[in-house]
Image (cartoon, rainbow, N blue to C red):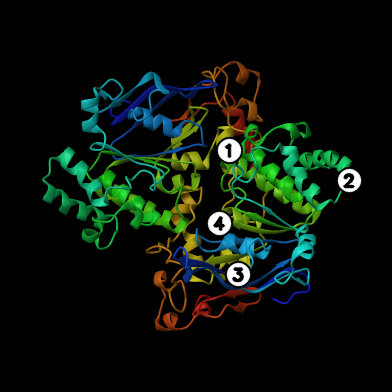
Amino acid sequence: MDDAHALVQVRDLVKHFPIRQGIIMQKQVGAVRAVDGISFDVYKGETLGLVGESGCGKSTTGRTVIQLFRPTAGSVAFDGVDLVNLKGNELRLLRRKMQMIFQDPYASLNPRMTAGEIVGEPLLIHRVVKDAEIEDRVANLLEMVGLNPSFADRYPHEFSGGQRQRIGVARALALQPSFIVCDEPISALDVSIQAQVVNLLEDLQKEFNLTYLFIAHDLSMVRHISNRIAVMYLGIIAELAGRDELYRKPLHPYTQALLSAVPIPDPVADAKRERIILNGDVPSPINPPTGCRFRTRCRFAEDICAEQQPEFREVKPAHLVACHFAEKFL
Amino acid sequence: MPDALLDVQELEVAFKTPEGEVHAVNGVSFGLKEGESLGVVGESGCGKSVTMLSALRLIPSPPGRVVAGKANFMGNDLLEMSKEELRHIRGAQISMVFQDPMTSLNPVLTVGRQLIEPLMLHLGMTQDQARARAAQLLNMVGISYAKQRLGDFPHQFSGGMRQRVMIAMALSCSPQILIADEPTTALDVTIQAQIIDLVRQLRDELGMALIWITHDLGVVAGLAQRVLVMYGGLVIEEGTVNELFANPLHPYTLGLLGSLPRVDEKGHPRLVSIDGAPPVLFEKPNSCPFAPRCKYAIERCWKENPPLMDVSTAHRVACWNWESVRTEKARSYG
C-alpha cells in the first residue's frame, strides 16, 4: 500500500463514540465502535468508493478522515502531513484542501441564506479572495456546476433536489480543494437526477484533478464512479480492490453476498444470477462478535473465525481481504 | 379487461394545495389478473402511490379528491362502495404494505396485538385462535421465537424485521391482492434481498396477485410479470417485463434505463441523464407531460397528449414518436 502517490493515508483508524450513564456523575459504560481499526490509501486523482450497509461506519470514516470527528486512535496523513495532531490555524489552512459534500441537500443548506451566500461563505471565512471579488467568484462557481448565476439571490427552498445538490457541490469547490469526501451525495435524489449529479462530479474531477472518497450504499453507482472500492462491515474494511477486480472476483463472503443482492435492471440477466441470501441482521456495533465480525452471518464460518480476527492482508496484488479463507476463493 | 380481478378505469385524482390544485393522477387505467405480479415504476411525484392509495380510498380527503374513474374489484366499484362494505375488503381481500415500517406500525401496541386485530375482525377468530395463527404468521415470514416475540413492541425489532411483521400482517387474512408500496426502499440491500425473496416465495405458495410500487427498475426486473411505467400521473408505457426491458420505446423509459449504472457494467459508459426535473401539474396535461425533457419531441407533442398505443399485444406506449424511436434504436445498434 505504500505508494508515493497516496494523497490520503489512513492507518489503524479508530473512532469510538462513548455511551454514558448518569446525569451528574456521568461514567462511561460502553462505546459504539463505529470505526474499529481501518487502513487505506486514497491515491491522487482517483475515486475510492466506500460501500457498506447502514451502520457499518462508512460515514464516520469519511468524517474522521477530514477531522470533522477527531479519531480515538490511529493516524490520518494528508499529503504527508499528519492531521491528527494538528490544531487551530494549521488545521484550518489544510481544511481548504479537504471538503465535503453531504447526503441530504435539504438539510445541508441553511434555509436562511441565499445560494450565493452559501457558496460564498467559505471564501469569506478563509479570506482567499478580496471581498469585492467574491460575487464574481460565486457566479463562476454556480456556472461551473450548471446553475444559472442569476440564481444566486434565491433561497434553497426555491431549488429542486438536484439543483440543491449542485449548490452543495459548488460550496465544496469554492476553496479549490484537492480532496472531496462525497457522503452519499445522490442517495436522496430521483433516478433521472442522480445521473446528472454523477456526470457533473465526473466532469469536475477531470477538470480540476480532484480526488474523491465516494461513500455510498448503492453498489451499482459506486462501481460506475470509483477506481477502487473498499467494502465496510461493522467498523472494519472487509475487502479493498480495484473496481473490476472486486466485482468480477469478490473474495470476501460478505462482498459476494452484497453483490449478489443488488437487483439488475434486466430480467434476463437477473434470472440467471446465483443469489446469496444472508440470514439475520447486522449485529450491534456496541458489542460486535468476537473474531471475524461477519462470522454470525457467514456461510463458510468455522471455529477459527470466532477465535481470531482475520488479518486485513494482500491476497493478490492490490487486492486486500480480511477473511481467514480468502485464498479458497481465488 | 373483463376477466380482471382489479380493473381500474380512467382514474383521476387531484390534491388541493395553497398553490392551487395539483393533478396527481390524470386518467390511469390498468387491470390485474388473478395471481399476476404487476410492477409500477416511476420517480417521486409521478402518481404511482396515489393511484393505488386512491383506488383503496386511502388518500386523505380533503385535500385529496378522486375526480373521476372506477376501480372495480371483482365487479364492484371500490370508489362507490359504502365504508362498511369497503372495510370487509380492505385488509381482508386486498391488503397493503407501506414503505416505512417505522411509522406504519403502532408504537404503543405490541406486535401481537396488531397482528391479532385483523384476524378477529375479518375472520371472526377467538383470541386464542388468533394468537396461535399470529405466531404461525410470524414464523412464516422468518421471525424466530415467534410466540415470545408477539409480546414485543415494534421498537424491539430491526427495520427488516418490522417490514416482515408488516408483511405478516398484510398476509394474515390470505388476501387476493397484496399491494406493496416501496416496501424495501428504506432497507439495506442484503435485507431487501431477504424481503423480496420472502415475498416471491409467499406469492407462489399462496397464489395471490401482487402490485409492487417502486422507483427501482432492478427490483421490478426480478419480481414482476408485467410493468407499468408512470410519469406525470399517467401510464406512459406498459408491457410484459421481458418485452419492456428488452425493447423500451418511450423516451422516458429509455432515459431511466440509461441513467442506471449496472452492477454488471462493462467498461465505463457515460450515464445518460435526462435534463430538467419531473413536472408538478397544476392542470390536467393536454400535451405530453414529458415533452419539455424529451429529445425526440415534435410539434404534435406540445399540442396533443398521446394515448397508450399498441406496439404489440404485450406492449403499449404513449408516445407520438415510438416508431421513429424504434427505427433510431435499431440503427444505432447496427
User: For the residues tagged 4 and 2, is the chain the same?
Assistant: yes
Location of mark 2 (residue): A130
CA gap between label 2 and label 1 equals 48 Å
User: Does label 4 or label 3 sit earlier along the sequence?
Assistant: 4
Location of mark 1 (residue): B254
Q: Nearer the viewer, mark 2 or mark 1?
A: 2
Can you tell which mark lies on residue A240? 3
Q: In the rendered structure, the residue with mark 4 lies on which chain?
A: A
Q: Nearer the viewer, mark 2 or mark 3?
A: 2
Q: In the rendered structure, the residue with mark 1 lies on which chain?
A: B
Q: Residues within 10 Å of mark 3 (few under 14, many from 20)?
A: many
Q: Nearer the viewer, mark 3 or mark 1?
A: 3
Question: What SS does tag 4 mark?
Answer: helix
CA gap between label 1 and label 4 equals 21 Å
Q: Are marks 2 and 3 in contact (CB under 8 Å)?
A: no
CA gap between label 3 and label 1 equals 34 Å
